[in-house]
Image (spheres, helix red, strand yellow):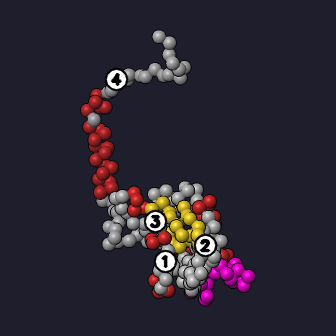
Amino acid sequence: MQALTTRSKIAVNKKMSFKERIYLPAIIGGLAITLRHFFKKKATVCYPEQIRPFAPVYRGYHVLKRDENGAERCTACGLCAVACPAEAITMTAAERKPGEEALYREEKYASVYEINMLRCIFCGLCEEACPKEAIFLTDRIVKTDYKRNEFIYGKDKLVEPIEKDKRIDVSVRQTKEVAEFKKHPEFAHNQVYTKALKA
């Protein structure tokens, strides 16, 4: 019978030695590794009682920012969705109606804004692409769940509260170069008013 491929290899049926057949050296080697690690300092952290320190630029839970007047910054331009390599962001744009000037900063806003946290790779490209500084990755951890539907985060989970004392400080996400850039008066319309920038 002709072989289907020329890349086939003949397997060698090597006989095991007595030492290999009794498995005792392998068991002793495994126990030695276990005993070495038994006396080392444990790497496990008992979360949530203990929280491992995070880097200041840790990228976690997303937040849609509001401006200093409490209006949503997002204008549904779609640049964050285009920049997302995992295609985790989807949105639907809508026109602002008369009387909604306090709710939405621009004439166009995102009526639906969703992030699929199961697809998100937390790269931070969405916040770099946003021209209005509407989306940021915070230092908060994304909560676990048992159902896939719970990981589709809409505006109810992403938009920060209107109350100024409950807003999320994202000044640590901005470099010195960005802070210097925002000091120019011609770029004041995109400024995030934080204590760090005012100081």
Residue at 33% across / 26% down in the picture? 16
Please indicate whether residue 69 sits to the left or right of residue 30 in the image: right
What secondary structure is found at the residue carrying circle 3? strand
Residue at 62% across / 60% down in the picture? 83
Question: Which residue does the numbered mark 4 point to in the structure image?
Answer: 15
Hey, what amino acid is under mark 1?
Glu
Residue at 38% across / 71% down in the picture? 51
Give how far apart the Cα atoms at labels 3 and 2 are.
Answer: 22 Å
For this orientation, the residue located farthest to the right is 186
Please indicate whether residue 137 sits to the left or right of residue 78 in the image: left
The residue mark sitting in front, 2 or 4, is 2
- Proximity of marks 3 and 4: CB atoms separated by less than 8 Å: no
Question: Which residue does the numbered mark 2 point to in the structure image?
Answer: 95
Q: Position of residue 70 (x, y in %)?
A: 54, 83
Hey, what amino acid is under mark 2?
Glu
Main SS of the magenta part reads helix
Give how far apart the Cα atoms at labels 3 and 4 are.
Answer: 58 Å
For marks 3 and 1, the one nearer the N-term is 3
Question: Which residue does the numbered mark 3 point to in the structure image?
Answer: 153
For marks 3 and 2, the one nearer the N-term is 2
Question: Which residue does the numbered mark 1 point to in the structure image?
Answer: 160
- Proximity of marks 2 and 4: CB atoms separated by less than 8 Å: no
Q: Is residue 58 visible?
A: no
What secondary structure is found at the residue carrying circle 2? strand
What secondary structure is found at the residue carrying circle 4? loop
Region of the chain picked out in magenta, as a range: 180-199
